[in-house]
């Protein structure tokens, strides 16, 4: 995603790139003066960010095997690393199969953990086809019902060989793509093994909260000193808030320095 207006249901469920890029640009001056400078998940900041984005851009899909993880057990472990074991240990785990994500382990608590690939980003983002992206994510039951389906559907399209243009056309009439997040929808991305960009690697452990279109002011987001960041999108689009946390899913301490 290249702009905040692209956030939300219409452009896919996981627009970290644009969200954090926009927020970092807003906070760039604050970082210089000691105010929390915000890191990004996939993108970068300012002119240097544009250059790095170009260097990491993948203009077309790589051979499908490059998006796969060597072994099923390795992918399961990586997916579970998204959240503390008290959550991920009883979650359903999905892995990338031949035609889409498939259940590898049945869950007990309603959460679903999986490793997101690059096409979970928005269609216009330079990382859309980057085969190195691995984003361990663990979604709660509300997000599983209303947030996850659009990206499971998109994965099926990708593995069926559809182009970006074809997927974008289908998105416009997809019921899943137009479903608003249910109240309380959230996800954990606390894995230190993830690879979220060629620039920032695993970035910071964080929580995500998915909302129907919501003003930043309601959460106090993007204000100096606030730990909450996000972007609204258009009135008919969803909003995603990000809250960095101070430890990885394995309980070890994570730096909270966002500069």
Image (tube, rainbow, N blue to C red):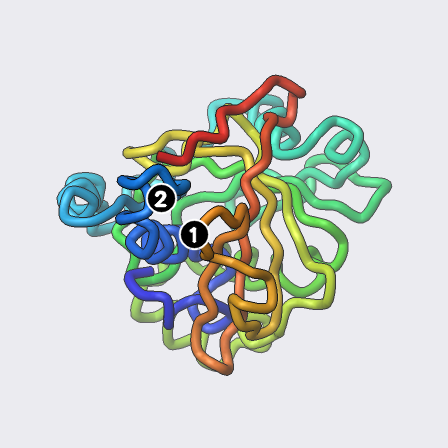
Instruction: Say above or below: 117 vs 13.
Output: above
Q: Residue at x 62, y 73 (%)?
A: 180
Outermost front residue: 33
Q: Position of residue 213 (x, y in %)?
A: 56, 74
Q: In this view, does 66 lie to the left or right of 245?
A: left
Q: Looking at the image, which residue is at 61% across and 61% down?
A: 210
Seen from the viewer's position, the closer of residues 12 and 219 is 219
Whichever of labels 2 and 1 marks the residue nearer the N terminus, that label is 1
Q: CB of mark 2 within 8 Å of CB of mark 1?
A: yes
Q: Is residue 97 visible?
A: yes
How far apart are labels 2 and 1 at the CA level? 7 Å
Q: Which residue lies furthest to the top in this view?
A: 252
Work out whether residue 67 can be spotted: no
Q: Residues within 10 Å of mark 1 (few under 14, many from 20)?
A: many
Residue displayed at 44% across by 51% down? 224
Is residue 142 or residue 158 the one in the foreground? 142
* Residue 42: mark: 2
Q: How many marks?
A: 2
Query: What number is the disc on residue 57?
Result: none
Residue hosting label 1: 16
- Residue 231 x, y percent position in the rendering: 45, 63
Q: Measuring from the top left, give residue 161's x and y in whole percent.
A: 36, 56
Tell me if mark 2 has few (under 14), some (14-19) or many (20+) residues whose alpha carbon lies within 10 angstroms of its own.
many
Q: Is residue 125 above or below residue 188?
A: below
In the image, is 174 to the left or to the right of 54? Answer: right
């Amino acid at each position: 995603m290249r702009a905040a207006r692209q956030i939300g249901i219409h452009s896919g469920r996981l627009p970290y790139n644009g969200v954090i890029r926009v927020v970092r640009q807003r906070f760039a001056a604050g970082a210089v003066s000691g105010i929390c400078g915000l890191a990004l998940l996939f993108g970068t900041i300012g002119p240097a960010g544009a250059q790095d984005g170009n260097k990491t851009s993948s203009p077309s899909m790589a051979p499908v095997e490059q998006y796969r993880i060597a072994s099923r057990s390795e992918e399961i472990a990586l997916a579970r690393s998204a959240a503390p074991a008290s959550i991920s240990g009883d979650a359903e785990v999905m892995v990338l199969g031949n035609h889409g994500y498939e259940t590898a382990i049945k869950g007990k608590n309603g959460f679903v953990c999986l490793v997101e690939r690059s096409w979970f980003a928005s269609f216009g983002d330079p990382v859309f086809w980057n085969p190195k992206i691995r984003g361990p994510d663990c979604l709660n039951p509300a997000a599983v019902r209303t947030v996850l389906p659009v990206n499971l559907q998109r994965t099926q399209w990708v593995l069926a060989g559809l182009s970006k243009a074809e997927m974008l056309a289908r998105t416009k009439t997809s019921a899943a793509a137009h479903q608003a997040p249910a109240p309380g929808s959230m996800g954990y991305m606390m894995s230190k093994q993830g690879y979220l960009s060629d620039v920032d690697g695993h970035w910071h452990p964080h929580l995500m909260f998915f909302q129907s279109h919501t003003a930043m002011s309601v959460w106090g987001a993007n204000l100096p000193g606030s730990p909450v960041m996000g972007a609204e999108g258009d009135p008919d689009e969803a909003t995603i808030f990000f809250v960095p946390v101070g430890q990885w899913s394995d309980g070890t301490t994570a730096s909270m320095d966002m500069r």
